[in-house]
Image (spheres, grey):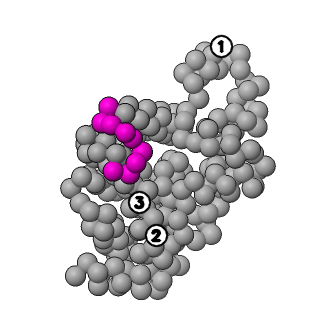
Amino acid sequence: MFYFYRIFSKILCKVDNSDKKIIVIGRQYGGTGRKTGRALAETLGLPYFDKEIINKVSASYGYDPDILHRADEKKPSPFRSMLLGKYGVMDMYATSPLSRESLYEAQTNVIRQICNENGCVIVGRTADYIMRDHPGLVSVFIHAPREWRAQNLIRRGEATSIQDALLKIKKADSDREGYYNYFTGRKWGTADNYHLTIDASQLSTDDMVDMIARYVGFRKNIK
């Protein structure tokens, strides 16, 4: 049944591609968000963007891609933010081409350009906030219990033990939360910020893709 629905979803999306559906997936580390995003893009026949956004920023603004990757989804340090906010002693850095704020602004411009050109699936990078006023936006947050995600990281070969996996999860989640909260003023992972929140430990990737695709179809009828 799901197989036939996925075939139907591809046909439906090609017919309605002019609607410019923008599907943004936020995710906890190890929760299969990236895998789900890629599968969803393939099912709906939409372009997929994740780290590809970094390459576009690098090409458009001439930034070193290594610098962009190091800054990817990481907020400015609390110490630098304190000095800038309270004492204004780092204004030159905050407006320099290599400041986190300037890099974020460049990434924002690229994300808007991508979304204005066509429908797409984007993973992370606060695209749900950047495109919040777009009528075709569908924002999704994929989460799962830490222990489940730790096991998933071991299966993927990204951790050698549960303890190792949990440490990586704690750091990655903290980076993403700090980045999202800093640049959006919202609370990362709070259900109110998303149209759908899904527990990846309860569904297969195919099931999550079908659920999101169905919701995208339902949204066509909402005026």
The x and y percentages for residue 22 are 49, 64
> Separation of disc 3 and disc 2 at Cα?
10 Å
Q: Image check: 114 left or right of 40? A: right
Rate crowding at label 1 as few (under 14), some (14 to 19) or many (20 or more) other CA atoms within 10 Å.
few
Mark sitting earlier along the chain (2/1): 2
Mark sitting earlier along the chain (3/1): 3
Residue that carries the numbered disc 2 in the rendered image: 41
Residue at the spot 38% in from the left edge and 51% down from the top edge: 156
Q: Is mark 2 on a helix, strand or loop?
A: helix
Closer to the camera in the image, 58 or 115: 58
| Type of the residue with mark 1 | Tyr
Residue 162, compared with residue 202, is above or below; it is: above
Image quadrant of residue 168?
Answer: top left
The quadrant the C terminus occupies is: bottom left
Residue 12, compared with residue 193, is above or below; it is: below
Q: Give the range drawn in magenta.
A: 155-163
Residue 85, compared with residue 173, is above or below; it is: above
The x and y percentages for residue 89 are 71, 16
State whether the magenta stretch is mostly helix, strand or loop: loop
Closer to viewer: mark 3 or mark 2: 3
Residue at the spot 33% in from the left edge and 50% down from the top edge: 155
Closer to viewer: mark 3 or mark 1: 3
Image quadrant of residue 177?
Answer: top left
Residue that carries the numbered disc 1 in the rendered image: 87
The x and y percentages for residue 181 are 47, 35
> Separation of disc 2 and disc 1 at Cα?
45 Å
Residue 41, compared with residue 33, is above or below; it is: below
Closer to viewer: mark 2 or mark 1: 2
Residue that carries the numbered disc 3 in the rendered image: 35
